[in-house]
Amino acid sequence: MKIALIGQKGIPAKSGGVEKHVEKLAERLATLGHEVTVYTRPHYTDKALREWQGVRLVSLPSIRTKHLDAITHTFVATMHALFQDYDVIHYQSIGPSTLAFIPRIFKRGALVIATFHSRDYFHKKWGSFAKWFLHRAENLTCTVPEKTIAISRGIVEYARERYGTDILYIPNGAEGEPVRTTEFLSAFGLREKRYVLAVSRLVEHKGIHYLVKAFQDLEDTGKLPNNLKLVIVGTHAETPEYEAYLKTMSAGRDNILFLGEQTGTALAELFSHAAVFVQPSEDEGLSIALLEAMSYGLPIVASDISGNEEALGGAGVYFRTKDVESLKNELAALINRPEEMDVFGKLARGRAQNVYGWESIARQTVEAYEDALRDRAHTTYGLRSKKNA
């Protein structure tokens, strides 16, 4: 099949769960013998890069503002896709999926699919109008494409209750292989198992401010091992004021490090040698950063939101979301029990390998395409009904 992926910023992924999802999915689809095209934005992926791991890259422009970047790029990519011989046009996230109606009307030969990654209107970077738009986008994502995929069971249940539609569950994936090298670790001034790690876009709903406050309080009361550091990997997503706030909170704290975006071997080293991974988010679909931490065998402290509980099951420790005191207690209790940390790390890695492998996810995605094509043969053209969703 000839498959186009639209809505992501680009690949290879620098930051963002959607971008990591698309990168790994596209690579596996190509390995399975499909012709895969990923549309990219020049501010994220070098426009001179035309191929990645067997995947064709097409760079197209966008209006680079917080509100217009994704939708304008999706529109231009959709217009380009209308004149290509794709068998499948696959939209990523609810905002871009609002334009899925265009190929449904003007390119009826192509199968139109969408992936529902998260309920984006919960993200605090958006204002009132953007949140209203994203609510409408969610409705369209669940009804316009010929098949909608959700990356968490929580989203599947939500769509069924809210819209009366049955959408398909195919999770995010992870593939971390611990490395022994410490070259980048040394350059960052870090020692093995002597730091707490968070990997996240720096936007408010990711809850990094709760982690910073909890770490500071534990450090001040002597409840952490001496010279343990907090390492925060990631940068803002059109929210520089929040990143500035976090750095102001952390001013004068030598043990709190902001390392910005990290990829490749540097990121692998950071995952491989951390003592604990913390995921303090207020809302997630199914966090790829969390799944990656699991795949590296890290003990994990996570907020008790449904997306985290779905990912971890019983293979981690939970704290009450938005509750700094709860986070302090759980983090201190875990990090001062090395044997318990080792048990949780092994449980997390085993769960990642057994449940969230990218090979299986790619095959499930191809099956979803094939099922949608079979459904098409038995239904008339139009939007999905509640019964045929």
Image (cartoon, rainbow, N blue to C red):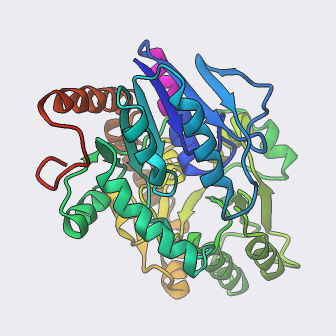
Quadrant in the picture for residue 110: top left
Q: Nearer the viewer, residue 24 or 209?
A: 24
Instruction: Reply above or below: 73 against 280.
Output: above
Horizontal and vertical percent for residue 312? 37, 56
Main secondary-structure element of the magenta-colored stretch: helix
Q: Residue at x 83, y 44 (%)?
A: 186
Horizontal and vertical percent for residue 203? 65, 69
Q: Is residue 177 visible to the viewer in this orientation of the structure?
A: no
Looking at the rendered image, the quarter that the N terminus falls into is top left
In the rendered structure, does residue 308 fall within the stretch colored magenta?
no
Horizontal and vertical percent for residue 77? 60, 38
Q: Nearer the viewer, residue 143 or 253?
A: 143
Please give the range of residues in magenta: 25-31
Q: Nearer the viewer, residue 32 or 128?
A: 128
Q: Residue at x 56, y 25 (%)?
A: 37
Instruction: Reply above or below: 367 against 30.
Output: below
Q: Residue furthest front?
A: 106
In the rendered structure, does residue 27 fall within the stretch colored magenta?
yes
Q: Is residue 326 visible to the viewer in this orientation of the structure?
A: yes
Horizontal and vertical percent for residue 2? 45, 19
Q: Residue at x 69, y 57 (%)?
A: 194
Q: Residue at x 51, y 74 (%)?
A: 131
Q: Residue furthest top?
A: 33
Image check: 293 left or right of 383?
A: right
Q: Nearer the viewer, residue 249 or 54?
A: 54
Quadrant in the picture for residue 180: top right
